[in-house]
Image: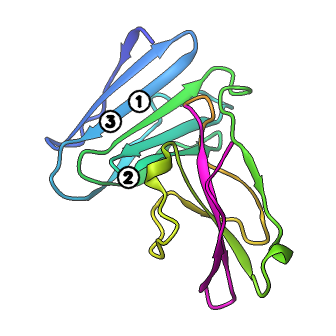
Amino acid sequence: YQSRLPSPDYGSQVECTARSGSPGNMLLCKSFADNPMTVTFDLSACAIAGQQSLQEYISPAGIGSTVNPSGTTSATISLEPGAAVWFTFPTIFAGSFRQPTISASLADVPNAAKVVVQYAYAPYALDPTQTDYSPFTLDCGGGTCSLPVDQAIGTIYYQLVYLNAASKVLSVSGLQTN
């Protein structure tokens, strides 16, 4: 990414830069606020017609990724203090984002009604006794889902949490990698 694109201004507590190059466009923003804040990011200057975009969020709690459909021109995000968010708009999206698929069987745990996956790029970020799930948790319902992470960043650590119909934890798997 070489050339600068016009960077949006979100006030004194959020700094942004936008870049362009042959691989595509990018918007990177960082919060310098001491408190959480919600910001609606204008993506229209970076969007590439007909292409999906990748949204990545990093905070002290970890990293999360989301694929935005083509035509997405804004994103409203709650930024934790010190968090950063970046959006990449590749000219060719295929192969630029590798999401692992997780499969679990509800039949493995008696009375399980759904499976939740807790995930992180670092094993110490997962606590098997945690009942207040972090933002890096995905409800996989009956047991199969694609994690909103990019395997190109590094190893993904995860654990399966089986819940009953009242969302009570029945079982937590050991730490696994993908």
Kindly indicate the quadrant of the structure image that contains residue 65. Answer: top right
Alpha carbon distance from label 2 to label 1: 22 Å
Label annotation for residue 29: 3
Label annotation for residue 101: none
Q: Quadrant of the N terminus?
A: top left
Residue drawn at x 74%, y 57% is 145
Q: Bin the neighbour count of mark 3 within 10 Å (Cα to Cα): few under 14, some 14-19, many 20 and up.
A: many
**Location of mark 2 (residue):** 61
- Above or below, 158 relative to 49: below
Callout in the foreground (2, 1): 2
- Above or below, 50 relative to 117: above
Q: Are marks 1 and 3 in contact (CB under 8 Å)?
A: yes
Kindly indicate the quadrant of the structure image that contains residue 116. Answer: bottom right
First reached walking from the N terminus: tag 2 or tag 1: 1
Q: Which region is colored magenta?
A: 154-178
Q: Bin the neighbour count of mark 1 within 10 Å (Cα to Cα): few under 14, some 14-19, many 20 and up.
A: many
In the image, residue 164 lies in the stretch drawn in magenta: yes
**SS at badge 3:** strand
- Above or below, 53 relative to 135: above
Label annotation for residue 27: 1
Q: Nearer the viewer, residue 100 or 30?
A: 100
- Is 112 positioned to the left or the right of 36 in the image? right
**SS at badge 1:** strand
Alpha carbon distance from label 1 to label 3: 7 Å
